[in-house]
Image: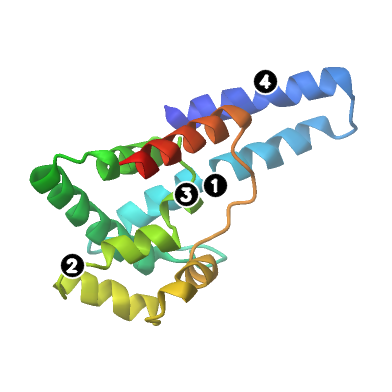
Amino acid sequence: MTVAAIEAETIGKCLEAQRVHPEPQFERQVLLRMQKEIEPAWWLSSVADLRWQGVEHVGPSQLKGVTFAQKYINLFMKQAMKKSSQENDKRLFFMQFLMNALILPPREFFKGDLLNMILNDNGSKEEMELRAELGIEDPELFQQRIDEIIPSFQLEPDDRIKKMLDSLQQLAMSK
């Protein structure tokens, strides 16, 4: 349902733009824009599905960053549960929810500073698996490595999402 809402919103934006500045091959441009808009949804769905035995990706191109994303999400959720139960801090759960709801772009979830924070898990199995997949130890290089591993997803979030992300970041920094 979220994908359908994204597609509907995309069509609305494209129709408005077409009304103001008509473009040839409008329909093709709309379909390409919709494909870019929903790409994160399909990637996240694939990351979740491919964790199950017997599920395989078949297609002309390999999905980028699946194993890393699965291990990152596993440790992220473990840390979210720990912070929630020990510190009554629900911000990580909220971030996970926003990303799963396709409100928070994956590049705002898979970030070097968050990776550095979740990697503090006393050498747990999940931490060691993620560190092995990451392949580097220097926190200064985490974002660069994430950018190499995780797809970039071309489109920028719209202004409403940017404002919400800014206010969430200010809230997180105030604690």
> Between disc 1 and disc 3, whose residue precedes?
1
Q: Quadrant of residue 137?
A: bottom left
Question: CA separation, marks 1 and 3?
Answer: 15 Å
- The numbered mark at residue 39 is 1
Amino acid residing under circle 3: Glu
Q: Residue at x 54, y 31 (%)?
A: 163
Whether 112 is drawn above or below 154: the answer is below
Amino acid residing under circle 4: Gly
- The numbered mark at residue 12 is 4
Q: In the image shown, does 83 or 38 lie closer to the viewer?
A: 83
Disc 4 versus disc 2: nearer the observer = 2
> Between disc 3 and disc 2, whose residue precedes?
3
Question: CA separation, marks 1 and 4?
Answer: 18 Å
Secondary structure of residue under mark 3: helix
The residue at which mark 3 appears reads as 108
Q: Would you say 92 lies left or right of 154 here?
A: left
Q: Would you say 73 lies left or right of 154 here?
A: left
Q: CB of mark 4 within 8 Å of CB of mark 2? A: no
Residue 143 image position (x, y, % from top left): 49, 67
